[in-house]
Amino acid sequence: MPAPDPSPSPAATALRPVPVSPTLAINEAIARKRREGVRVLPFGFGEAGIPLHPSLTRELAAGAGRGAYGPVAGSPALRAAAAGYWNRRGLATDPDLVVAGPGSKPLLYALITALGGDLAVPAPSWVTYAAQAALSGAAALHVPTRPGEGGVPDPALLAAAVTGARARGRTVRAVVLTLPDNPTGTLASAATVREVCRVARDLDLVLVSDEIYRDLVHDPARDVPSPARWAPERTVVTTALSKNLAAGGWRIGVARLPDGPFGRALRASLLGLASEIWSSPPAPVQHAAAHAFAEPPELVERVDRSRRLHARIAGAVADRFERAGALLHRPQAAFYLYPDLEPMRDRLERSHGVREGSDLTDLLLERYGVGVLPGAVFGDDPAALRMRVAPSLLYGADDEQRLAALGHPDPASLPWIAAGLDRLSEVLADLGGEAASGHGAPGRGGQAPAALAS
Amino acid sequence: MPAPDPSPSPAATALRPVPVSPTLAINEAIARKRREGVRVLPFGFGEAGIPLHPSLTRELAAGAGRGAYGPVAGSPALRAAAAGYWNRRGLATDPDLVVAGPGSKPLLYALITALGGDLAVPAPSWVTYAAQAALSGAAALHVPTRPGEGGVPDPALLAAAVTGARARGRTVRAVVLTLPDNPTGTLASAATVREVCRVARDLDLVLVSDEIYRDLVHDPARDVPSPARWAPERTVVTTALSKNLAAGGWRIGVARLPDGPFGRALRASLLGLASEIWSSPPAPVQHAAAHAFAEPPELVERVDRSRRLHARIAGAVADRFERAGALLHRPQAAFYLYPDLEPMRDRLERSHGVREGSDLTDLLLERYGVGVLPGAVFGDDPAALRMRVAPSLLYGADDEQRLAALGHPDPASLPWIAAGLDRLSEVLADLGGEAASGHGAPGRGGQAPAALAS
């Protein structure tokens, strides 16, 4: 019998349990399936799927020698460039009220922590808002959106939820909007945003407007209704280079704070948090980001091309889901769609034992190698058969394919993209078919059936 | 009479008050004095004051095209290189137990948050540990160090403090060590670290060992007694490139977690927090950091030279303080010293109205343009006349001067460094002199007196 360990480890059970963000976890789960030799459709992770533009790479190389920490809020050059970016979009911006951080994710975390109190978020909404609220010691109030207007809580439901929470003794300080929206790929109307602004004023809520997908509205003529237009005194806007210029791995984001005493105080609190959590954004990246936010013609063209590519492929994927019988609001922005397989519920349960959304997405990953995220991770009803589909990693396996996709007038016809789309149709047909071929229960961890893997 | 504002801003008073980290704030305060035309001695900020090595800049440029997020824990190449770095220092390391982040500061924040509970820290210690504990909703227990052994709480006092806090109903989960130490520039003995390891086992505390200055011990033959050697099952080690290679602005750090079930569970919690707070460390920087942690000969030589430079100048500054009558433990590592002006207390009070540490550092900044931080910001007794002096920004005003300092056998003789040292002696002489020249009270915001500014 072995002697008892003389130096037992600390109790792991006392640790704070924080699961990895589902959007990042699905990325790693898909990589695992790939290592197992499974043919995958990586529709889980919100990465733009296009290469960095060479002028960005060149500017980062030019800034590589910047080793000093620099100001907590980011360099004056970066803050001025970000102010210019917003000025060109009709939001007059004082560079002193711009704060940069290592991504808009940490900026949102610091904002939510600085504001304190519970946070109203749309249902569904990006997984991280609610997770960050929980980390800061608060709760998220999930408020349903109007149909087809993802990212903005229904104004009447927002008022009721905040009033109700306050009546129960909770402090609610802010509401998050996502314009345009992740996970639904839709854009709320100006009318709805204005109503939310009115509710925010009536109930003294701060509006946090995550506009990271602003430049990726499929119809470039369509206006993005930022609440900063109607409630400038209480709106914080965040954005980054991760989505429009595919620089997610660079870790840079910016926040635009409201003018006036509240904005100045928020800036002080935000910089205090930034100084204790991350010091400053990466200095070489700040140099390149100043170039990007100045929007030179080659980057404007790159964003235009990527917007067209996202529109084409999201549209093609939507077609496949609709043909298979799914319900769906047509994607209007970014590289997301949010189909609902409710019309196939009976067959899914009979053939595959699917009862709720996560059964469906587990089945899709384990049997078919299709990585998507169930609506529940975005705060949607767990029973619903809704899921977020992010087809941008279909654009290519390498930069050569991705550049070809960016330049092609009909990217869905490129062989590797067409193959992915056809594979999706095949999976959806198999999913929705009757149980006739022995596919009764989902084969956890198994290979895709031979008939489909071909 | 103007109409009342129809859309009042949210109440700024409801915001979470978080002051900017004093180490970063002094950097900005010194920049302000400089803009006012004051001749400054920037001894406030813990920046290494040497240029980036060209091979680092080259590697960052080579990695500039990396735009994808990549794994939350950092790239396999970076984690393997960091494991190699620790292996060469006698700490066998599994790359799977290495987690990279955008600086060791956010890693420490996530660790402290994951561990939960109150945090024992040395008094004095780096400002951020206690601030991060407060942000995570816990308290810091400041435990005095043994004389000349900064960075490690006195073991008996640690045991008493933790036992006492627990008796008052507090949960205390971890203790931070800084080896070698910021702010004192000293290195604790192996005997003291071993005693702390024993206390940690007896009281089931996790040891968080911040070893960011490990490679900057002035005597390169001297052993750095990491607690990972004696309490491997409960020790987390952190380090970064900010200090030994002056890449603070790059924002990259690594943590080495203990092997076994506790370490694995801590990794899971840490990655959950990382995924919701910062996603991943900057990808191009990870590429360059993998090169740095592999320790190619040119970087080993650079660290050697910078260690010698830090030793020479910290020693020269210590000489000036000693000659002026200050008490001081001779600096043994990094670019910090921690003089105590207690022997000058009577004169400081009579001539300058100085009663406590922050009076002294305010006087030094406002009258003399000397930026240093009072001991109180590090958790030391506010009444004490101790302060942290970081002379590394004396090495040069530009990279040409800094390279000359790195290469010089007697850098204190270089004209710009000698001028800074002489200015310091002048200030200390004036500080300690009797009030005979009308310098009765500190002249807030004024220029340095003409007799000194020349």
Image: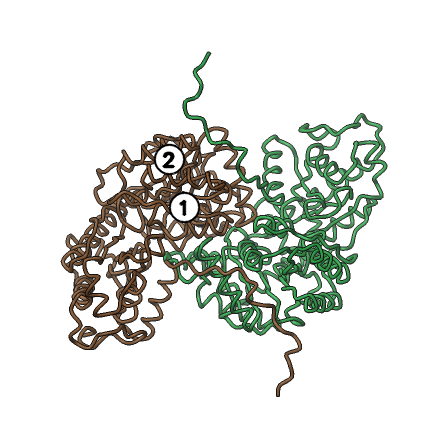
Chain colours: A brown, B green
Residue labelled with disc 1:
A141
Secondary structure type for disc 2: helix
The residue located at (71%, 52%) in the rendering is: B142
The answer to which of B112 and A353 lies nearer the viewer is: A353
Mark 1 vs mark 2, foreground winner is 1
What is the x, y in percent for residue B432? Answer: 82, 37
The residue located at (14%, 58%) in the rendering is: A323
Q: Is residue A182 left or right of residue B386?
A: left
What is the x, y in percent for residue A190? Answer: 27, 34
**3D distance between C-alphas at marks 1 and 2:** 34 Å
Secondary structure type for disc 1: strand
Mark 2 surroundings: few (<14), some (14-19) or many (≥20) residues within 10 A = many
Rendering quarter of residue B311 = bottom right
- Picture layout, residue A21 above or below residue B362: below
Disc 2 chain ID: A
Query: Seen from this angle, which residue lies furthest bottom?
Result: A1
The answer to which of B418 and A405 lies nearer the viewer is: A405
Residue labelled with disc 2:
A84
Q: Is residue B35 left or right of residue A325?
A: right
**Mark sitting earlier along the chain (1/2):** 2
Disc 1 chain ID: A
What is the x, y in percent for residue B96? Answer: 49, 70
Q: Is residue A18 left or right of residue A305?
A: right
